[in-house]
Image (spheres, rainbow, N blue to C red):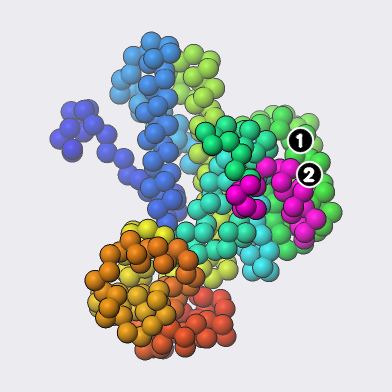
Amino acid sequence: MERATKDNKAFILNPVVGPEPITGSTRMKGGSATKILLDTILLLAAQKAVDQCAINEHTVRAFLRAYSQCVESVYSKAADISCLVSNAGKSLQASGHIYYFGAGTAGIMGCIDASECVPTYGSDPEDVRGFLRGGYDTLNNADGCLANLGPLYRLSWKDFCDNILGHFSSSDSAIFLLSSPDEMEPCADLAEKLKKTGGHVMAVLYNFQPNDAKMSASFSTVFPQSVLLQMPPVPATGGSAAVQAAVCRRLGEFALKLVCNSVSTGAHIMVGKVFQNFMVDVQIRNNKLFYRAIRIVQHLSDCSDAAATRAVLSALYDTDDVTPLVDINVSQHVDRGTKQEKVVPIALLCAALKMSPSQARQQLTVTPVIRHAISAVVTK
């Protein structure tokens, strides 16, 4: 591959484009890198098919450079993003909630970020939720409206207003995701209702035009706490206006992804879901997470792989005798793991202090902030 790179026949990309080292979360590195790659490949393919433009090294580098500039633009607003993180974290610490609101793909980015919090941090599905203006009509999914499957499938703004708005309190955070200043008007009415509760009401806007003083003033009035992002110039690769507009939207989506990932990650760090850069309350929902749970227990308790495996199985099945479980197919462990909470914290206490699962669970009841409970064990 390195030889091919020297001959300009291949590109090696360093996928560290987000703050993955904070928690080891692949969504903040691998997920972001995957979006960059897919966007670049598909946008260049569209440009070639629609505009009959030649694709060469220059056009590929121009697209990748735009994403690099997008990252720089987002993190130049670190101080503003930190305010969102702080408020969101305070909400979770107070047993409140984080709600994303958006239209179109901006709203979808919020829904995606919210959906990742349950398997990543072991959070309650109600802790972080996304709501999309137009709901399933906007998604245009093949199966149509799925709201009848239960409350967690109700994701339109109307669903929020009908079922949650009356319970929104000073402990909650609302984050509006906007792709254009033109979207502010439909957001303003809901934002004002939310602000009356004393909750945190914030916004993230990409395509911000700093020279539009009137817009800036009106936006700040509705959203005093906001992140205003300037997008980098669309690569001058000769594409049509339609393709250029698509490029601008993809860059905006990427910017929102970085901000949302930062908010939900930082908030869960504040609530104690992360210890020494490990997501210590990860829920075992697939094979990867099963083996990740074992590695976390092994590392933090300084035990063997076999001992860590026994501790995880003990926590999973609430038993001290795991001998019959060792040879069971991992898929069965995963099936059980999707229904179990705090498997890794319990397993860690079992491995480090030779506790039984019931004793470990009792310890977590006494010290509910998982990071504190684990810290007490690791520092002994």
Residue 299 appears in which quarter of the rendering?
bottom left
Task: Rate crowding at label 1 as few (under 14), some (14 to 19) or many (20 or more) other CA atoms within 10 Å.
Answer: few
Q: Which mark is residue 190?
A: 2
Q: Foreground: 154 or 173?
A: 154
Q: Which segment is the magenta one?
A: 148-169
33 vs 175, left or right, is left
Residue 324, horizontal then vertical, whole percent? 27, 78
Q: Foreground: 60 or 323?
A: 323
Q: Is residue 149 magenta?
A: yes
Task: Rate crowding at label 2 as few (under 14), some (14 to 19) or many (20 or more) other CA atoms within 10 Å.
Answer: some
Whole-Å distance between the Cαs marked 2 and 1?
8 Å
Which amino acid does the dot numbered 2 rest on?
Leu
Residue 58 appears in which quarter of the rendering?
top left
Q: Are marks 2 and 1 in contact (CB under 8 Å)?
A: yes
Residue 168, horizontal then vertical, whole percent? 76, 57
Q: Foreground: 93 or 314?
A: 314
By secondary structure, the bulk of the magenta-drawn segment is best described as helix
Q: Which residue is mark 1?
A: 186
Please say if 170 is above or below 221.
below
In the image as oriented, which residue stretches furthest toward the front? 148
Q: Is residue 10 magenta?
A: no
Which residue is at a point 66% across and 60% down the rendered structure image?
97
Which residue is at a point 27% across and 69% down the rendered structure image?
328
In the image as oriented, which residue stretches furthest toward the right? 196
